[in-house]
Image (cartoon, grey):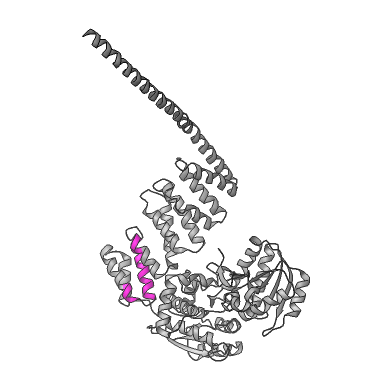
Amino acid sequence: MTQYNFYDNFILMRIYKKYFLFIFLCLSLCSSCIKKQEIPLYEEEVEVIPVVDSLYNYSKQLYKEAKYTEASRSLREIIEKYPTSEKVDDALSLLLLSKYRLKDYKGVISTAKGKHKLYKGRSTEPDILHIIAQSFEKINENYEAARNYFEIIRIPLKTSLKSKSEEKLKKIMKKLSFEELKKLAKKYEKTTLGCFTLYTAAKIGLEQGKDYEARKIHNHMKRICPNNKYTMEIARLLKGERAVKLSGAIGFLAPLTGEYSIFGKRVKNGLELALKGRKLRIVARDTKGNPIEAIRQVIDLIKNEGVFVIIGPILSMPMIAASGIANLLKVPIISPTATEEDISSIGPYVFQINVGLGAQAIAMAKYVTGTLGCYKIAILYPDDAYGNSLAEIFSEEAAKYGVQIVAKHSYPEGTTDFETPMTFIKDKNPEAIYIPCYPNEAVMIAPELRYYKIDAKILGADGWNDERVPLKGEKYVEGVIFTGSPTMVYKNTDIYKDFRRLYLSQYRTEPSRESALGYDTGILLLKTISTGAKDTESLTNSFQEIEPFAGTSGVVNPRGVFEGTVPLYTIKRGEIVRLK
């Protein structure tokens, strides 16, 4: 029995020894791993926080010294390397503010995109949203600006930015389309400005003849804010208790026969569509595109027809001639399409809404120096109102950037041989040549530049933005850079799509830019009449005081001030493509 126990114990001890060695090795390995992990964990705690603080304080100092680019680099490092830091939202806020100071508004928007988790629910949220909203406003993306201002109002924290956002929203809403206002109202109707948003949408709906839609909004307002002053105001408008309208007729001046009659008819179609269903009589007169005839007709409209406002003329020279008479007789006159700059400066009764030409020349002058780096430039242009206006404005604007205009040459209408200007320009050896011409001229000029071995970057205006240019110009127009009409940007908006549907149903043809401008002029007139104007003087005051608003052709401003963005295009592989 004793021998058995001894042998049994001996076997057990050997087994225990093996297990003990195994357990000991496991514990040693675990201990080693834990020690290895403790070092970086401890170092992160004592080193990362001082690094972030140091970088942030350094960035703040750079910002105070107006070194916004340098500050942006340090702040971006904090956001990218230490996204879980307590300072990350402060760093993002200061980074966006730096970009805003640099006027890099698109940079603000792209930087903030997808980073809402970094600031959501933190004290910096209202400030960050405010910078984003202001940036959208600067680039005329008013719907997105409004959406961000609404987000500030919705934040439960007390902040002075709420009242500022409300003030901004009341102004921005006047620039939004009916569809955009409906979307905002649906999403933010429970905010402090919810009922006001619904009211603005209903009012614009009424101005655009969408009485059924306005009534639907009013019924909804009665449910959510029954005793609100805005609900009662819409009820009053729906009953027809609108402001007193001016008596008499609307004068319309345009070429209805002859070379430019197609443009006159397009504008007239747009105007009539806007005023459809309204008790307003249009008295049309044919200017034949002639300034003298425009003077005769404007006198006849005012003296014999008693019109209270004149729409047109649609060409610049007849408009300038007619404006002096209308201003003298104190009847407001507004051109939907005249492109000559500063027509509205003729007098207080003179207005125009198509002022994109000057903006194109200014945008190109900035691009050719800032992006292309060209400072020796030649200008070749048609000797008419379009060419002269663009050439003059481009020259003046380019000079501000230090550009030397080494050659400036015009050519008369109908020119097919450009040998004289080509020889003149070649001798000056320009780095770039600005050619604000028409499509049929563009496809003749581009090959001649190659023939005369003028190795300069070709620049143009919206005359190049025509499918005939890459089709007929072939390889000679590859790489040309040109500005497009600012109104092109708005063709994807809801308000333009609504207008297009209306126009197609009425006229069975696609609307042109002239039609859109005619329509916007009609809407502008309805808006000013609805303010309560009783005579030509009060109507003129309404034109002067009305806030710019979103129209089918872009942002409408009767004071002759451009509101919008000028797009840039190039021709690549036979296709017109927009530059980013």
Q: How far across and down, in percent of the image, does residue 446 sit?
A: 67, 75
Residues in magenta?
185-214
Q: How far across and down, in percent of the image, does residue 128 sit?
A: 46, 51
Position of the C terminus by quadrant: bottom right
The total of numbered circles placed on residues is: 0
Q: Is residue 345 visible?
A: no
Q: How far across and down, in percent of the image, does residue 482 sit?
A: 61, 70
In the rendered image, residue 210 lying in the magenta stretch gets the answer yes
Specify whether 546 is left or right of 156: right
In the rendered image, residue 506 lying in the magenta stretch gets the answer no
Identified at 33% across, 66% down, the residue is: 230
Task: Work out which residue is located at the far left of the displayed protein and give it.
Answer: 1
Task: Work out which residue is located at the far right of the displayed protein and give it.
Answer: 427
Identified at 50% across, 80% down, the residue is: 512
- When asked about the image quadrant of residue 278, the answer is bottom left
Camera-side residue of 390 and 41: 41
Camera-side residue of 117 and 252: 117
Magenta stretch, main secondary structure class: helix
Camera-side residue of 66 and 379: 379
Q: How far across and down, in percent of the image, does residue 176 sit?
A: 43, 67
Task: Work out which residue is located at the far top of the displayed protein and give it.
Answer: 2
Position of the N terminus by quadrant: top left
Vertical placement of residue 54 versus 521, above or below: above
Q: Is residue 117 visible?
A: yes
Specify whether 572 is left or right of 217: right
Camera-side residue of 385 and 368: 368
